């Protein structure tokens, strides 16, 4: 049994971020909420997500795995507006997930979960971090467009910086630590990350969301944020560029 | 002689609906107003329209037939905004229709009316009907996208329903009769109609318009509505899918 | 040395108009301001522009030539909103122009100015003119779409007119001299100009701008306007169609 109701905007935020790296995802459903982990095909980015039962307006579920097609859920979200409640229920006989928005019912076949690869848990411990509105990251990626394929993300001694350096042109954004919501940098670190992945995920995070960006020298970047009053926790992890020379 | 003025938004509504099935149309102009009938090339949909002289801000005309290219009228409408008055006048010497919007004059050649096929009048008598805002139909068709090519439209015992059933997924919308502006169903009926035609016409009807949807088992669907305080009457008729099995 | 600050909307207006005819432009920078002249590759249109030091929020410069890529400046403008201040500074060592908008820095390589062709100064003296909001010209060009490739621009005895005459259809706009901000026509004149050039430039001039349109029989059209409280002066010149017959 699985039955839940969620706010349209919460579902939109979740699906938006997850679908920057996969089209199909396996949900681990349990009485206490839903968890998922997914990695993109090139093994460059990974997402870990937990939505506690309180992230939903109502929630009741047994332990199970559900394989879902995110494009189909996006089609349902498009039928709603912010503020709408979207209900979901498993039709066990037909192996379908049934969504309702107002007078509309849309049911979709599930994907066999065993066919969906799930990455191992990543116990990533990073020591440097900055807290900031995702809007700043969105601005920094817009500034980097068509200059280079990589963005240098730096937690410096007293600032957060993004830089995109091409052969002839370059773009930089520097935000002083006093203008950040949080800043904890025991040791400065800066790494190159693929700009397309970085841009896609920061565009997908709802404007105004406070995110924690973490990195250490030579290690993956992690962007963490929560939604639905902290009841949904998301971590997005991005591998650094490996320098060959 | 033909000379008339009409509100931009009224003309836009009319042309929008007619152009879902034809590009060129023959207008039967008379002192009392304009009538037209048109059928799409595949003979699946038909429109009947009457605009009485009072639908216009001013109107004076002799009996005549005018063949017009709807794309050219759309180009004129784009030069106006809601609230603008569009004037039309026949230039008999040049066989052109001359439109004016503010300081702009745009004249277009007429099409020889004898070259435009006009369907016979359809005296369609249907017994079941529901009255509802077209917005509900627009919502139901949005929900049906990319599931199947046909939509099942049902006037049930106590509800209006639209359903689109694909191999793996389905979409449904159900509106209880108490939530409809009118409901008269002596005998429940449900038929499959081509989704593209249905979607195109309901998208073309201005949001907020009250429409009457009529159908009987195995018969065409008719959508009727009026504009310009009831002075324009439109009927759109759509053939049901013929089941082969 | 070159260092200046300018309002985002002023820079946007300038670059928008210039880029209707060239992608790269040579700026003649001097202590008193910036001048440029550019002609399109087909030698049909030309622009002359002067931005005095007071057009900038701050300005200080030595005499020099700078070759700039307008697409790169457009990318900077996109990072700003109306009201933002954009600063520019020459990095002489790297031969780069460095733009700043808030926390963003974007630096771009310069183009060797000797590689950019600059047309001779055109001392064009025209006697007939009309002063009007560019919005009227924008309206007239919208009305002319898909009728013909040329627009007839006429300064008549007591009106300004635009006409586009095709084989079957035509569009006209007539504005009486009493509805114009200025009108000085010692001798009526009307010439055909290429519609695409004309449409592109009038679309690029910010809505609400008062322009002076000048022409004489058989001669180029000139559109002049100013921005930034008169501190920026722009002249756009368009060659008439040469009639062969």
Image (cartoon, coloured by chain):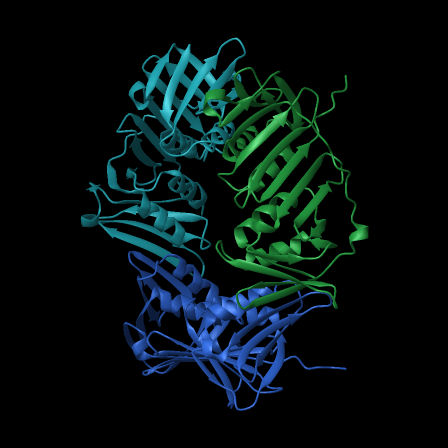
Chain colours: A blue, B cyan, C green
Q: Does the image show residue B215?
A: no
Identity of the residue furthest to the front in this view? C31
Count how many numbered circles sit on residues in the image.
0
Q: Is residue B101 above or below residue B144?
A: above
Residue at 55 percent of width and 43 percent of height = C227
Quadrant where the C terminus of chain A lies?
bottom right
Asked whether C62 or C110 is in front, the reply is C62
Residue occupying the point 77% across, 43% down: C118
Q: Is residue B139 left or right of residue A134?
A: left
Q: Is residue A57 above or below residue A35?
A: above
* Front position in the image: B98 or C85: C85
Residue plotted at (33% across, 68% down) = A88
Of residue A230 and residue A172, the one placed in the foreground of this image is A172
The residue at 68%/32% (across/down) is C238
- Quadrant (top left, top right, bottom left, bottom right) of the N terminus of chain A: bottom left
Q: Is residue B6 above or below residue A146?
A: above
Location of residue B18 with respect to B93 vertically, above or below: below
Seen as rendered, the residue at the extreme right is C114
Mark yes or no: residue A133 visible.
yes
Residue C156: image quadrant is top right
Residue C129 place in picture, x, y as percent = 59, 25
Q: Where does the image place residue C97, in percent across and percent down from the top left?
A: 68, 61
Percent x, y of residue B233: 31, 28
On the image, the x and y values in percent for residue C40 come to: 73, 40
- Please tell me which residue lies in front, B155 or C53: C53
């Amino acid at each position: 049994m699985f039955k839940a109701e969620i706010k349209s905007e919460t579902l939109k935020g979740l699906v938006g971020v997850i679908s920057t790296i996969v089209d199909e995802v396996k949900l681990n459903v349990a009485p206490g909420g839903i968890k998922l982990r997914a990695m993109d095909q090139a093994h460059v980015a990974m997402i870990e997500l937990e939505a506690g039962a309180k992230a939903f307006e109502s929630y009741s579920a047994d332990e199970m795995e559900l394989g879902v097609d995110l494009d189909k859920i996006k089609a349902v979200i498009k039928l709603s507006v912010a503020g709408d409640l979207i209900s979901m229920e498993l039709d066990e006989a037909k192996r379908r997930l049934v969504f309702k928005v107002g007078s509309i019912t849309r049911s979709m076949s599930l994907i066999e979960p065993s066919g969906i690869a799930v990455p191992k848990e990543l116990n990533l411990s990073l020591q440097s971090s900055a807290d900031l509105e995702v809007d700043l990251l969105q601005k920094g990626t817009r500034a980097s467009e068509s200059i280079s394929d990589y963005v240098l993300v730096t937690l410096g001694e007293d600032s957060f910086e993004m830089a995109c350096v091409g052969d002839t042109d370059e773009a930089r954004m520097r935000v002083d630590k006093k203008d950040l919501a949080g800043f904890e940098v025991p040791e400065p670190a800066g790494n190159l990350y693929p700009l397309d992945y970085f841009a896609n995920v920061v565009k997908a995070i709802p404007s105004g969301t406070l995110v924690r960006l973490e990195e250490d020298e030579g290690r993956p970047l992690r962007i963490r944020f929560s939604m639905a009053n902290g009841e949904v926790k998301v971590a997005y992890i991005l591998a650094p560029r490996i320098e060959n020379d």
